[in-house]
Image: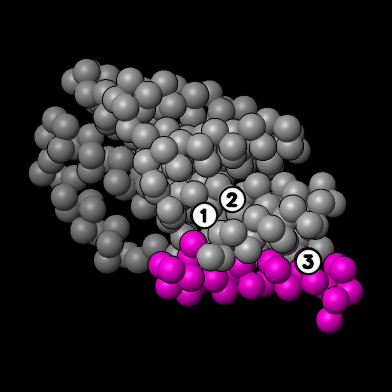
Amino acid sequence: FKIQMRLSLIFIFILGFNIAYPQSTKETEQLLKKLSSAKDTVKVNALNSLAWHLRRSNPPKALSYANEALALAHSLEHKPGQAKANKNIGSINWISGNYDRSLENIKIALKLYSELKDQTEIGNMYNLSGLVYWNKGDYTKAENNYSHALNTFKSIHDTDGIAKAIVNLGILNFEQGDLKSAFEHYMEAEKIKIKQDDKIFLANISTNIGIIYSKQQNY
């Protein structure tokens, strides 16, 4: 059940990140074309966009773009670009299984986003930290970070972020054998997503609820 649960949930609840669909060659070409004529902060943004776009399909190349974005952002003293580049590097390292490196960059991104007072990204960084600690098997730190993410998203009424943080807490409940709390978290997130008519999210929630019923032998 744990393997099935991870496969179901990790597909959609990536830290408040977008769902990872296969990356189109056309979109990559468009981003590269934009990069070819970009300068200064526009180039920083273009490099960061490419890094984010390729983070799953080509992590090494994505990491190269993110590091280039970080270096340029530093030279321009462009704090938003530095924050995004660190977020990208942290995400890529997480995807690649380099968890300790990932946490280093996430910590830097969190500090920068805090200075920028970007509450959405602050919540995202806490959520990403939680995912990294979850993969490391440190459920206490994962829960602490998910809770910080949830409180941050609640403070700005970000219902999408709230739902993802709640589900991530549910994953922890499930893996620690607390099926009742996991079910409650999934149902809470489901209510939010019904209002948003998020069919993909709802389909995954239904699968996860079904796993709980199966484990309880409630057919």
Judge whether 127 appears above or below 25 on screen: above
Query: In the image, what residue occupies the spot 87% across and 68% down?
Result: 216
Q: Is residue 99 above or below residue 29?
A: above
**Left or right of residue 121: residue 216:** right
Which residue is most to the bottom?
Answer: 219
Write down the region rendered in magenta.
Answer: 192-219
Q: Is residue 79 inside the magenta stretch?
A: no
Residue that numbered label 2 is attached to: 166
* Residue that numbered label 1 is attached to: 163
Amino acid under label 3? Answer: Ile
Residue 46 in the figure: left or right of residue 92? left
Q: Which residue is mark 3?
A: 212
Other residues around mark 1 within 10 Å, as few (<14) / some (14–19) / many (≥20): many
What amino acid does circle 2 point to? Ile
Q: CA distance from mark 1 to mark 3?
A: 19 Å
Packing grade of label 3 (10 A; few <14, some 14-19, many >=20) is some
| Residue 6 appears in the rendering | no
